[in-house]
Image (cartoon, rainbow, N blue to C red):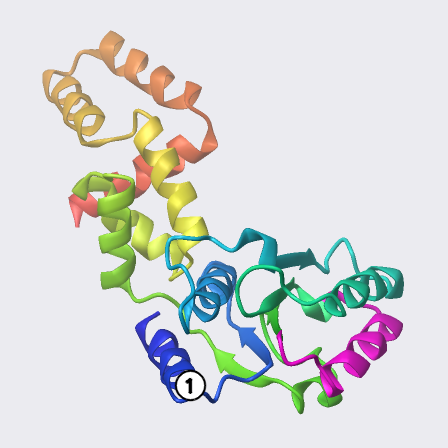
Amino acid sequence: QHQVAETLMHEINNNKLAQAFLFTGPRGVGKTTCARILAKVINAQDGGDPNQDYAFNIFELDAASNNSVEDIRHLIDQVRIPPQVGKYKVYIIDEVHMLSNSAFNALLKTLEEPPQNTVFILLAESVDRILPTILSRTQLLKIPRIDSESLSKHLREELNISPVNLQSVLVRAEGDRIEAEKLAQAQEETKTTRDIFIQMMRVCYKKNVIDMMDWAETIASEGKEAQKQFLEYCLHMFR
């Protein structure tokens, strides 16, 4: 997400860092990752230690399961305490649209007058369910789906995915990094790869019925996901 990174670094370098952000975008595009990186970078500025992870300065709340006003009040109680290390305390609230109305109102009061050493980063898939009063007090950054080239590079470097499976994963993931990693791992762990396809074709060419039945049973035993992957690969090869 180079464009998002450039925007944030421009603000940091020009001392125009907002105290409240709203990161929006589909699942798996890196909203949480961007938030964590931002939290570390702003604490490493102005003489901070770039080798520190500043874990004690970063607080994460999953609003999908912690959405009550009590949860927000507990968070606000921590806001009043200044950071012991680094410059900022950063509060990352994931799935912020899941907060109850009373929790939203409690959060709003803090966003109106946040302490100088505090930064809030709210995460949501869209702005549709965010209160206008919250939107007006945050800087909105829309994080797009990951392009195929970047996602392809990530999968090759991090998971060492085979070229055979890569294209299928990219098409099915639709820019979702989390889904792409799950699909890649599933494909690499199953037997529905190029070798299986080649061996299956050899069996068919020899018209050995018994071996054909054995291979069919092997594919069936791998489960529905493996069967789907094998059929997709067959379609890809026969195009």
What kind of residue is marked 1?
Glu
Q: Residue 116 location, x and y as percent?
A: 64, 81
Figure check: 104 above or below 26: below
Residue tagged 1: 11
Q: Residue 135 location, x and y as percent?
A: 66, 86
Which residue: 78% across, 56% down?
Answer: 66
Q: Is residue 111 magenta?
A: yes
Range of magenta residues: 98-117
Q: Is the magenta stretch mostly helix, strand or loop?
A: helix
- Secondary structure under tag 1 reads helix
Figure check: 230 above or below 205: below
154 and 32: which is toward the camera: 32
55 and 121: which is toward the camera: 55
178 and 166: which is toward the camera: 178
Q: How many labels does the image show?
A: 1
Q: Residue 92 location, x and y as percent?
A: 62, 64
The reply, left or right, for residue 18 in relation to residue 70 is left
